[in-house]
Image (cartoon, helix red, strand yellow):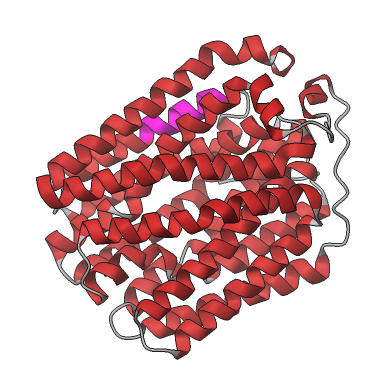
Amino acid sequence: MNQGFFSQYKGLRKEIYILFFGRVVTNLGSMVWPMLTLILSQKMGLDATSISIVTVSAGLLMVPANLIGGRLADRCNKKWVIVGGDTVSVICYIICSAIPLGWGSVILMLAAAVCQSMENPSYNALIADLSTTEHRDKAYSLQYLGANLGLVLSPTLSGMLFKNYLWLSFLISGIAIGMSTILIASKIKDITPERDTSEAGIYQQAQENTSLKTILSENKIIIIFMLGMALYYTAYQQYNFLMPLEMGVVHGENGAVLFGTVSSLNCIVVVLFTPVITRILAGKGDITKLLSGQFLVGIGYVIFLLFLGHIPVYYLAMLLFTWGEICSTIGEGPYLSKRIPSSHRGRLNGFSSVLAFAVQSVCQLTVGRLYDKGGSLAAWTAVFIILAAAICLIFVLLFRDKKHYPKLY
C-alpha cells in the first residue's frame, strides 16, 4: 500500500484525528464484548435460545439509552457525553476484573455497553459536525480505520486469555478505555460545527424548532434506509452469534481461539483495505457502496458454511465478509448525515439505533430458536432471507434517492 492511500485523509480538522486516536486506544481494549456468546455458552452453560434472550434483554436496555443519547447529542456538549459514557464503562470493566465471573459480571458488561450505546449518537454526530459534505466519506472512513487498528490484536489475545485469564481481559479493557477518555477530555477543545456552504449542504441546514416526527415525515426515504440497514445488521451480527456457535460445535474449546484469530483477521483486513477501498469507491454513490457490501457479506457466509470444519477456508470467508463490511460502513454514515438537518443528527442516530434494535430483537430470537429446534440449516436459512430483504430495500433507494435528493447527484 503506498502513501497515496493515506494522503486522502489529509486536510481534516485536528479534532477528527484526535477522535481517530481515541478510537484506536479504546479498541485496543475491546477484548470482552466480542466473546460474550462464548462466555455465556462455554463459561455459563447457556443454550442458543437463552443467549438470544440475554442479547435481546441487553437491547431492551439500549432503547432508552439510544433515545436519551440522541437527545443529549443535540442538546448538550457532545464531547462530555462521550467522556461521561466512557467513564462509567471503565468503572464497570475494572469491577468485572476483580469479581468472580457470573451474572454480576454479565450485568456490569451490559451496563458498560449501554453507556457506550448512549454515547454513540454523540460520536456519530460529532464526526458529521466536524467535516463538510465533501470530506465526510473520508472522516467516517478514518474513524472506522482507527477502530479496527485497535482491534487487530485484541480478539486473538482475548481468545488466548479466555480459558484461564478472562479477568485480565476485563482489566485491559478498562485501562484502555480510560486512556482514550483522558485523551478526548484533554485534547479536544473546539467542537464548533463546520459550515457547509456547498449546494449539497442544503439538506443539512439546521431546523431547531422542527420535531423529529416532522423531519421523518418529510424524509420517508430515510426510514427505508434505516429499516434496510437494521435488517442488514441483523444478518451481519451472526458473525458474533452463529459463527462462534458453529466453531464451538465443530472445534470444541479450540473454537474460542479460532474465533479470536478470525476476528483479528477481520481487523487486519479492515486496516489494510479500508484506505484502498475508500479510494477505489471514491467516485461511487453511497448506495452502491451499501449494496456491494451486503452482497460480499452474504458470499462470505456462504463460503464459511460450505466449508465448515476446514479451518483455512474460514480466513477466505472472513476476507470477503470484511470487504463487505468495509463497503457498507463507508457508505452508511455519509448517506444519513448528508440528508438530514444538522440539528437532528443525534436524535436521528438514536432513532435509527432503536429501530435497528426492534428489528434485530425479533429476528435474533427467531434465529436462536431455529438453531435450537431446527438446527444450523434452519437458522442460516433465516439469516439469508433477512439479508435478501435488506438488499431489496437498499435497491429501492437506488431508484428513488436521486428524486428526493437531486443536489447530491
The image shows residue 130 at horizontal and vertical percentages of 80, 45
Picture quadrant where residue 390 is located = top left
Of residues 127 and 355, the one nearer the viewer is 355
Residue 309 among magenta residues = no
The image shows residue 126 at horizontal and vertical percentages of 74, 49
Q: Is residue 345 above or below residue 272?
A: above
User: Measuring 81% from the left and 71% from the top, which residue is drawn there?
Assistant: 186
Name the quadrant of the C terminus: top right
The image shows residue 15 at horizontal and vertical percentages of 80, 55
User: Measuring 84% from the left and 33% from the top, which residue is drawn there?
Assistant: 209
Numbered disc total = 0
For the question of whether residue 4 can be seen, the reply is no
User: What residue span does the magenta drawing correspond to?
Assistant: 287-296
Q: Is residue 234 above or below residue 173?
A: above
Left or right of 8 in this view: 92: left
The image shows residue 157 at horizontal and vertical percentages of 40, 74
Q: Is residue 101 above or below residue 72?
A: below
For the question of whether residue 96 can be seen, the reply is yes
Picture quadrant where residue 286 is located = top right
Left or right of 217 in this view: 167: left
User: Measuring 79% from the left and 38% from the top, which residue is drawn there?
Assistant: 343
Q: Main secondary structure of the magenta part?
A: helix
Left or right of 181 in this view: 197: right
User: Measuring 52% from the left and 11% from the top, which residue is drawn there?
Assistant: 399
